């Protein structure tokens, strides 16, 4: 990259920091004073600007709205007790973002823009990182196609934007989960591994159907037999069977390679728990449940870290769990949160200091 990548900074003339309390801020409602906007055209990134958070002016023919070239990431930054700000494993998100971009035929975003831009932006708005217990600054990098023509082809112009959103604790009660047998989230050769907007759009109808039946989310299964497990809602899923923590393997390309998933595998090993990444069928889980060997099931993702699941329903068979008795998932969550908050040693070098 060349000198064009210098980030042009236009500061706000009036901070909105004190307009609302940050304590217990709901997820994704408030945005910091500034945002980063980079523009791509003619085969190159043209400009990178940090500017006051503001509305965008867009053409109604905007390619992203019609044909879905739109990808994003979700990352969190934390403030420790001494006021230091650190981001949890953002380089992993940077790499994943460009994998998503490749799959959606969108340009690669260089490290100078994604990483250095994010760092400069957070540094500028560091007072917005909430210092309260279990609070964080949610970081939302995203990119979308901006050509203003209706012809179906990869857009030639794009915007890459980073928004920052201060967020309170994410309390999620143990969930009831419906094992999906009709709808499909991802198929080998498809886009399941990419964090594109359309995957979320496509998940809403099956999720709403499961809600009508009294369930919180669906457990996605493979497209062909609806038998092999993929993810839970928009989180990776773990099962503790016979004291081994297992999660679906990534090689089919149907699973989003979560940073929380990867971190969980490491922390579980640190806890002395055996882990396995493999193909897992609902039948083997039911068998293990009946034998009393299937003891815990939980989701893993940046928003909630670890979400406990108290019920799984497959056809008419219901598996209930007493989450109060669990030992693996609660300890995993405690350890992950302690690392992210700077409360325990960062032995894996996961914190990126701002
Ligand atoms: C974002 C996401 C996850 C979780 O990934 P993290 O990096 O842990 O936040 C899992 N599954 C899907 C489908 C996702 O979009």
Image (cartoon, rainbow, N blue to C red):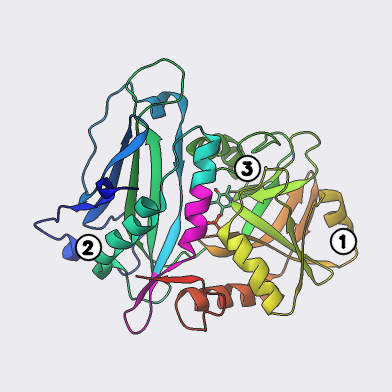
Q: Are marks 2 and 1 in contact (CB under 8 Å)?
A: no
Q: Residue at x 89, y 57 (%)?
A: 287
Q: Residue 69 vs residue 291: left or right?
A: left
Q: Residue 5 vs residue 96: left or right?
A: left
Q: Secondary structure at mark 3?
A: helix
Q: Residue at x 32, y 52 (%)?
A: 163
Q: Residue at x 73, y 58 (%)?
A: 247
Q: Are marks 3 and 1 in contact (CB under 8 Å)?
A: no
Look at mark 3 in the image and give the residue it sits on: 210
Look at mark 1 in the image and give the residue it sits on: 288
Q: Quadrant of residue 19?
A: bottom left
Q: CA distance from mark 3 to mark 1?
A: 25 Å
Bounds of the magenta segment: 78-97
Which label sits on residue 20? 2
Q: Are marks 2 and 3 in contact (CB under 8 Å)?
A: no
Q: Secondary structure at mark 2?
A: loop
Q: Residue at x 41, y 48 (%)?
A: 110
Label whose residue precedes the other's in the sequence (2 or 1): 2
Q: Is residue 95 magenta?
A: yes
């Amino acid at each position: 990259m060349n000198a064009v990548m210098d980030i042009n900074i236009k500061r706000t003339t009036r901070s909105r920091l004190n307009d609302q309390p940050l304590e217990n801020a709901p997820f994704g409602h408030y945005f910091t004073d500034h945002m980063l906007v980079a523009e791509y055209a003619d085969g190159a990134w043209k400009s990178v600007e940090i500017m006051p958070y503001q509305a965008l002016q867009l053409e109604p023919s905007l390619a992203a709205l019609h044909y879905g070239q739109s990808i994003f990431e979700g990352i969190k930054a934390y403030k420790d007790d001494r006021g230091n700000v650190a981001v949890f494993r953002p380089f992993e998100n940077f790499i994943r973002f460009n994998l998503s971009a490749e799959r959606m035929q969108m340009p690669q975003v260089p490290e100078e823009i994604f990483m250095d831009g994010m760092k400069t932006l957070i540094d500028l708005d560091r007072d917005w990182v909430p210092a309260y217990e279990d609070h964080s600054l949610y970081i939302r990098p995203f990119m979308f196609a901006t050509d203003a023509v209706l012809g179906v082809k990869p857009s030639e112009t794009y915007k890459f934007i980073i928004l920052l959103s201060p967020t309170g604790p994410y309390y999620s009660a143990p969930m009831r989960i419906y094992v999906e047998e009709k709808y499909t989230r991802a198929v080998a050769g498809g886009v399941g591994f990419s964090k594109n907007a359309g995957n979320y759009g496509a998940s809403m109808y099956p999720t709403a159907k499961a809600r009508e039946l009294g369930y919180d989310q669906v457990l996605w299964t493979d497209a062909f037999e609806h038998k092999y497990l993929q993810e839970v809602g928009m989180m990776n899923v773990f099962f503790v069977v016979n004291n081994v923590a297992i999660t679906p393997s990534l090689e089919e390309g149907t699973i989003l390679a979560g940073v929380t998933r990867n971190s969980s595998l490491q922390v579980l090993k640190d806890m002395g728990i055996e882990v396995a990444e493999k193909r897992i069928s609902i039948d083997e889980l039911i068998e293990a449940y009946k034998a009393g060997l299937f003891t815990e099931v939980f989701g893993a993702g940046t928003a909630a870290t670890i979400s406990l699941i108290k019920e799984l329903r497959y056809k008419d068979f219901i598996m209930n769990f007493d989450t109060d008795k669990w030992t693996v998932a609660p300890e995993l969550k405690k350890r992950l949160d302690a690392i992210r908050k700077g409360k325990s040693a960062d032995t894996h070098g996961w914190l990126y200091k701002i």
